[in-house]
Amino acid sequence: MLSTLIYSSQLGTGYLPDLDGLAEISRRNNARQDITGILLFDGESFFQILEGDEEAIDSLFDRIRMDKRHDSVVKIMSDHSPARKFGETGMRVLDIRSHNVMDEASLALRQALGTRLPPSDRVIKLIRAFVEGKWRAPNRGACDLPLHETAGAPAGQADGNSEDVPQQNGHCQFALQPIVDALGRHVSSYEALIRSPTGGPPAECFAGKAGDALYEFDLFSKKYAFELAARLGFKEKLSVNLLPMSLVKIPDATGRLDRYLSDYGLKPAQVVIEITEDEAITYYDEFSAALKRLRARGFGLAIDDFGAGFAGLSLLTRFQPEKIKIDRAIVTGIEQDGPRQAIVKAIVECCRSLGITTVAEGVETVEEWCWLQASGIDLFQGYLFAQPRIGAIPGIHWPTRS
Ligand SMILES: Cc1cc2nc3c(=O)[nH]c(=O)nc-3n(C[C@H](O)[C@H](O)[C@H](O)COP(=O)(O)O)c2cc1C
């Protein structure tokens, strides 16, 4: 099957661009594999379109992405088409600084590329986006930071029971994971993550509960999260997850949350309620009334797992929380994934306009953090900084200059 792959990359630090050398090796190899395409260079970044048999393209891309002459390789498009768009076998290589590629209707560019694609073609639009600098890696300097461990609490401890904290009850317990400002090196808040009495995942806690009993348990369990915060003498904010339907179905849910807090000498202003998208939209009127009550009492609000379900944007049109937590499914491997990058950039832009703080969830690698930090995400949560720790505050790995 005919396959098209498009990626962008940045000239490797310390490498001089040798376009003639690249053109020669590419033409020779690609002709053998019946691969066509173009390679553009703008002085800093490459943009390559590869067309050919799917297997041949994938194996060439595997080779290219390991090439030390460039880095920050981002796959922008991988698609199939009935016919080639760039007929010339081998590889046409162009330094776009010497071509008037911004010419109206891209005529000059299309002539230079030897293609008859109309300006409305997606590939031509992607080329234009590259020419306009949209696929340059964001501020790479922010990423040159080694990770450094804080003194004090044991860093990155696994999600096990802390020895000095007794189990709280027979129903559930909570693990704490920090949400951090990585460059400012401070903890913005801790999320309390529910665990079963034996330390199992949330599903184990909720197993066998349905309908009102589920919502009742969901609400009541927050009491234990607040108890933990009080026991640990928390000064930071505490984030807790709440099913939207617990707010809708349980009479005076807000009042009960308030009472649980005051039992432990805590205030609503210390608590951020994280809400997942999906059910909220089905019962929006009741949900909206519950949100008003929460706000009136001073609770903070966040949309959790943003981008994981179908209702994220729809929910955002109706209510704007202080925080949006971008789902790990979008975050994982973002430094290599063009579509996810474009989506996150749009979320950052949108949240800036609306005054909403952005949090990236599930950050596990330095590369993910670097890309997200440089693109303007405010706060981070994930194993890179700290694993959740049951009944105790985990230590944190901070990025720092050596
Ligand atoms: C930006 C860039 C684009 C490249 N494009 C191609 C290409 O289209 N075809 C190719 O065979 N090698 C290309 N290369 C070179 C490959 O990474 C690799 O060096 C080469 O395929 C190795 O060939 P060999 O195994 O025959 O020595 C490119 C390298 C860079 C940095």
Image (cartoon, rainbow, N blue to C red):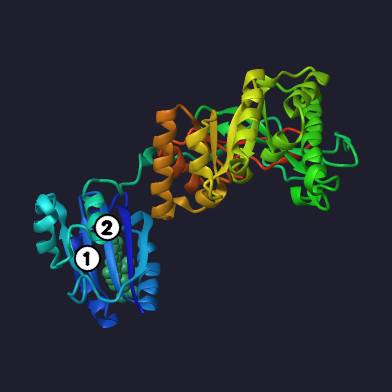
Q: Camera-side residue: 54 or 59? A: 54
The secondary element bearing badge 2 is classed as strand
Residue 221 percent coordinates (x, y)? 80, 36
Q: Which residue is mark 2?
A: 47
Q: Is residue 274 left or right of residue 66?
A: right
User: In this view of the protein, which residue sits in the foreground, 285 or 219?
Assistant: 285
**Residue located farthest toward the bottom when viewing the structure as drawn:** 32
Q: What residue lies at 64% left-to-right and 40% top-to-bottom?
A: 386
Task: Work out whether 338 lies above or below 377.
Answer: below
Q: Secondary structure at mark 1?
A: strand
The residue that appears at 48% across and 29% down in the rendered structure is: 356
Label 1 crowd (10 A; few <14 / some 14-19 / many >=20): many
Residue 142 appears in view: no
Disc 1 designates what residue? 38
Name the N-terminal-most of marks 1 and 2: 1
- Mark 1–mark 2 Cα distance, whole angstroms, equals 8 Å
| Badge 1 amino acid | Ile
The answer to whether 133 is drawn above or below residue 251 in the figure is below
